[in-house]
Image (tube, helix red, strand yellow):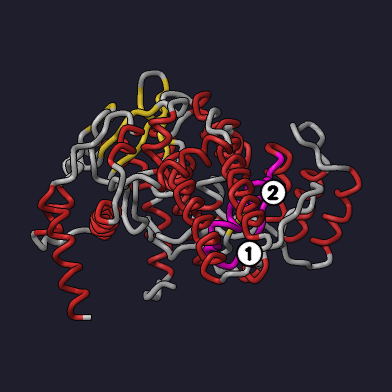
């Protein structure tokens, strides 16, 4: 919610600053929308025509005033449980439509300068750059026709297990709220991220495959969890089995984060954006390629060591990223299969993590950012009591605990190049601190 009350003059100023025609902002009439919906739903000159038997019931549901909840064009569905929601389109205010119009106008400028051509081609299919918030009845139909994916409306950020369950069945969870007018970056996903960021990526086959493959990796993880739970009665063992599955999915989620959400790709010898998290923020779109602060590292997704590098890199969502990974090409992203995601996640769980600021031995570095740190720097900062961001702090503590518990250092050879030995004084410091805490507890 915004803390400001905007005047008509403010609205005009925002519109002028973003080259938006204020009089064009807002939804079309219901009759005009219905005509467009009917025309779209019955269009057969598309890669995935809507099944004939599903067209009229879909239109009838809109005419009857039903709110859009989840796509129903395929034989698949997903139970959103308590997170299920609907888009009440008539409730959007003029200010929210203006916020959308201004945001996408900003995005269009940076996208056309920094996004890869496949992304721009996909975005043109969905007419994202309009002066009104997309109506999910229409958008869902267009997405299905072009990609075979559908929308699933949720009220808030949903658990990772449910998020990737949706992906395995080619549903994409979308929220219904719009960020306040004038806000660029937002931690939680809104329509500006879910729609204006993600929708075009569905049309890039390699990216859509990575998304669905993460869903299928989730299925592998939790199917195995359920088999392991069969017949187990000890509460502690049950909790351990469940925790391991959740942890594996968290490591898999890092691969998703550094590709689908914040991925870059080489194109015609230049670095270009395709990650939805980047492209939904005009500020980060420019920052990800032109700034001197963050690291940019080239990866080949075909290489297990590079996939492991992603799975072992921690991050934060509260600000622009400090390291971006640049894929050599889209076709190499296609090699990120469900089994490889699972294998990399399992290996990552047995290894110490890197932070989002680190340059790691063996990295193919395109840009060393001004905030770059070495692998061991986090331990010395922790020992010195220096102010550290949460990513550095939790990674340092987590790694020290792993070593103190008897970590097998031979496992470090799984990385492309083994990182430097953990400083002995850091490990001793950790043991001394925890020994003192045990005595006082």
Q: Is residue 296 visible from the viewing direction of this image?
A: yes
Helix or strand or loop: what does disc 1 sit on?
A: loop
Mark closer to the chain start, 1 or 2: 2
Vertical placement of residue 64 versus 328, above or below: below
Residue 434 horizontal/vertical position (percent): 20, 67
> What's drawn in magenta, residue-wise?
148-172
Q: Quadrant of residue 39?
A: top right
Q: Does 157 lie within the magenta span?
A: yes
Q: Is residue 276 visible from the viewing direction of this image?
A: no
- Residue at numbered disc 2: 150
Residue 179 horizontal/vertical position (percent): 46, 63
The residue at the point 77 percent across, 50 percent down is 76
The residue at the point 39 percent across, 31 percent down is 306
The residue at the point 55 percent across, 63 percent down is 158
Q: Quadrant of residue 285?
A: top left
- Residue at numbered disc 1: 232
């Amino acid at each position: 919610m915004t803390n400001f009350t905007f005047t008509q003059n403010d609205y005009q100023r925002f519109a002028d600053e973003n080259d938006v025609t204020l009089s064009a902002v807002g939804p079309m009439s219901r009759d005009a929308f219905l005509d467009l919906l009917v025309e779209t739903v019955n269009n057969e000159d598309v890669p995935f025509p809507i099944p004939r038997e599903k067209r009229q019931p879909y239109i009838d549901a809109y005419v009857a005033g039903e709110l859009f909840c989840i796509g129903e064009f395929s034989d698949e569905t997903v139970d959103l449980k308590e997170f299920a929601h609907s888009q009440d389109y008539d409730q959007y205010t003029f200010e929210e439509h203006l916020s959308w119009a201004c945001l996408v106008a900003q995005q269009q400028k940076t996208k056309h300068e920094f996004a890869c051509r496949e992304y721009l081609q996909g975005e043109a299919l969905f007419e994202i750059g309009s002066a009104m918030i997309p109506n999910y009845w229409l958008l869902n139909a267009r997405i299905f026709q072009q990609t075979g994916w559908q929308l699933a409306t949720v009220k808030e950020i949903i658990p990772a297990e449910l998020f990737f369950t949706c992906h395995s069945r080619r549903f994409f969870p979308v929220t219904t709220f719009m960020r306040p007018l004038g806000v660029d970056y937002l931690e939680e996903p809104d329509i500006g991220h879910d729609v204006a960021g993600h929708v075009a990526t569905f049309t890039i086959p390699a990216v859509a495959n990575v998304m669905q493959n993460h869903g299928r990796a989730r299925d592998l993880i939790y199917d195995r969890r359920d088999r392991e739970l069969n017949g187990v009665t000890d509460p502690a063992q049950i909790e351990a089995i469940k925790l391991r599955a959740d942890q594996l999915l968290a490591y898999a989620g890092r691969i998703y984060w550094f590709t689908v959400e914040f991925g870059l790709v080489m194109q015609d010898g230049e670095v270009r954006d395709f990650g939805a998290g980047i492209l939904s923020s005009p500020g980060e779109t420019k920052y990800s390629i032109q700034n001197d602060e963050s690291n940019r590292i080239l990866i080949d997704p075909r290489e297990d060591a590079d996939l492991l590098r992603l799975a072992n890199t921690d991050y934060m969502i509260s600000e622009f990223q400090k390291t971006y990974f640049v894929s050599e090409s889209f076709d190499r992203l296609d090699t990120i299969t469900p089994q490889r995601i699972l294998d990399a996640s399992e290996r990552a769980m047995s290894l110490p993590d890197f932070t989002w600021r680190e340059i790691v031995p063996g990295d193919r570095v395109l840009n060393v950012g001004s905030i770059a740190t070495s692998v061991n720097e986090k331990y010395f900062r922790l020992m010195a009591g220096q102010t550290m961001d949460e990513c550095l702090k939790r990674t340092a503590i987590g790694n020290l605990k792993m070593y103190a518990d008897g970590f097998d250092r031979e496992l470090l050879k799984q990385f492309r190049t083994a990182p430097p030995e953990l400083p002995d004084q850091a490990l001793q410091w950790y043991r001394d601190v925890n020994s003192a805490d045990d005595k006082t507890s």
